[in-house]
Amino acid sequence: MQSLTDIQLIEKIRVGDYIAFRFLFERYYIPLCNYASGFFKNDFLKEDVVQEIFTKIWEDRKKIQIAESVKSYLYMSVRNKSLNRIKSESIRQEYTGNFFRNAETQISEAELEQEEFKNYLFRCIGKLPPRCKDVFEKSRFEEMKQEKIADSLGISLKTVKAQIGKALRLIRECLQFSYPEFL
Amino acid sequence: MKNKVELIYSILSGTASPEEEIQFRVLMEQEENRSLYNQLKKIWDRSGEVKDYRLYDTQKAFYDLSQNIKSRKQIRKRNFVIAVSGIAAGILLMLGLLKLTDFPSQNRQQASVAFRTESGNRSVIVLPDSSKVWLNAQTEIRYAPDFGKTDRSVFLSGECFFEVKHSDKPFIVNLKEFKIKVYGTKFNVSAYSDDQSVSTCLESGRISIKQKGAKELIVEPGQLIEYNRQKSTFSSSMVNAEEYSGWRLNKMYLHNEPLIELSKKLERKYNILITFVPETLGNDIHYSGIFSNENAEEVLGAIAIASGLKYEKKGNYYTITVR
């Protein structure tokens, strides 16, 4: 199921394959939420919008018609639903003011590509061995300095550098293996 | 490779020593190293941006989504409850007419079959095993599609009179507080959620009452069993059973009934709303008597005269006060 294309998953979903539906969801949930966060500051709202879109896909699965790519369809749906939500709930204070999204009628390929890369990257980071992942996340997610990381984990500075180096190598390999077009 | 990567890391993180910077410049003279650097730079830069992704629990989100989809499906199924209306002379609904078991179902859950009467209505239905059930006003009775497979189980809220056909499969009436096991028989069950007590009265045959953790209580014909909800106790008395199913024939038999309980019966039967001023009036006065075929006004008129009260009527709203 992992290796099926989006269109192949949609075809399976159309005939009621809930597992295929789950795969599609897992493939796109985080990037779509992340995309939606450009419209809302509120965590709940952006997840809610994405959930609504997937609910509709399942409930209307028999009649689903996707002309362009599944990817653009999903991003467009998020954009449209988010804008409608803003309009109807008058939550202008939550709107982060990303006016450029408002102006576009299409999601740009570049934007899509960026979102996708981030998603794959996140997954590859998730696959790092635990110790390595821990050091890398402290460095890049928590922006900790090398010395601080060494102190907090009780390891040497040399080890910190080695672990981060290892992380970079593994992430690169992971991306090359699964998503070569992104490097 | 390991060393190259670590060197590039030093540069990317801005922690390179002067020597490392020189080494780096030498490294960059080669095309393949430049390409490696670009890749690692992309990873390095973007990885800071994905830190918020950790806030997302995809598994939990999918679980929530599935629950949502399931509950939306239930709501649509519940809308299939048949609201039955009609007066006692009886609308007989044959189950064959209801194709609810054909309901398309993803997870193989089958729809329950339910019948419901509103205020002011009564009806009669026939269960798949040919047992007859009379429903009084504001009553809902439910059973699963596998009714009759291993047992004949129904769920009741409200008041029904049952005429249960003999069968080796036990007939069970499930109430909130206890269940009634039936062995082929005629009996009445009154289980309105806003009543102080739940009661069952056996006309003929044999039934037993089973409450969780308690012994099975066998009921004889002519016995009225009342369960006090507040005290959680059963009491039994011998009565003229036919009086307790009199509602089928539009008759109301009252035995020293507190006015408040009587008013609830009247509300259900006639689809009206009765208020007492003061509220305690409902508890202080008791009434005994028989009503049949009178309308709401006639009944209230009779009660008012008998009890020294008066009533006011505005459409379907009645207020009872002291004279």
Image: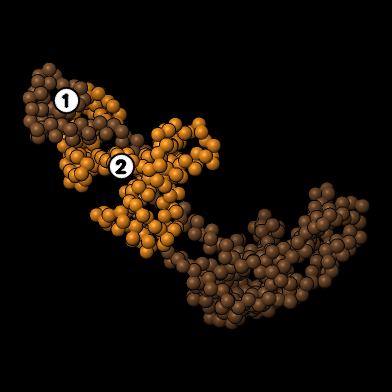
Chain colours: A orange, B brown
Question: Which of B221/A75 is in front?
Answer: A75
What residue occupies the far top of the structure in this picture? Answer: B18
Residue B49 is at least partly visible in this image = yes
Residues at badges 2 and 1 in contact (C-beta under 8 Å)? no
Residue type at numbered disc 2: Glu
Question: Which of B260/B206 is in front?
Answer: B260
Secondary element type, mark 1: helix
Secondary element type, mark 2: helix
Question: Which of A41/B279 is in front?
Answer: A41
Q: Residue at x 37, y 55 (%)?
A: A66
Q: Which residue is drawn at 46% across and 45% down?
A: A81
Residue density around tag 2, few if under 14, some if 14–19, many if 20 or more, within 10 Å = few
The residue under label 1 is: B10
Chain that bears disc 1:
B
C-alpha gap between disc 2 and disc 1: 33 Å
Residue type at numbered disc 1: Ser
Considering the image in quadrants, where does the N terminus of chain B appear? top left
Q: Where is residue B35 in the image (x, y as percent from the top left)?
A: 14, 34
Q: Quadrant of residue B160?
A: bottom right
Instruction: Point out which mark residue A109 bears.
Output: 2
Chain that bears disc 2:
A
Q: Position of residue A179 (x, y in %)?
A: 21, 45
Look at the picture and state if B236 lies above or below A108. Answer: below
- State left or right for residue A166 relative to residue B314: left
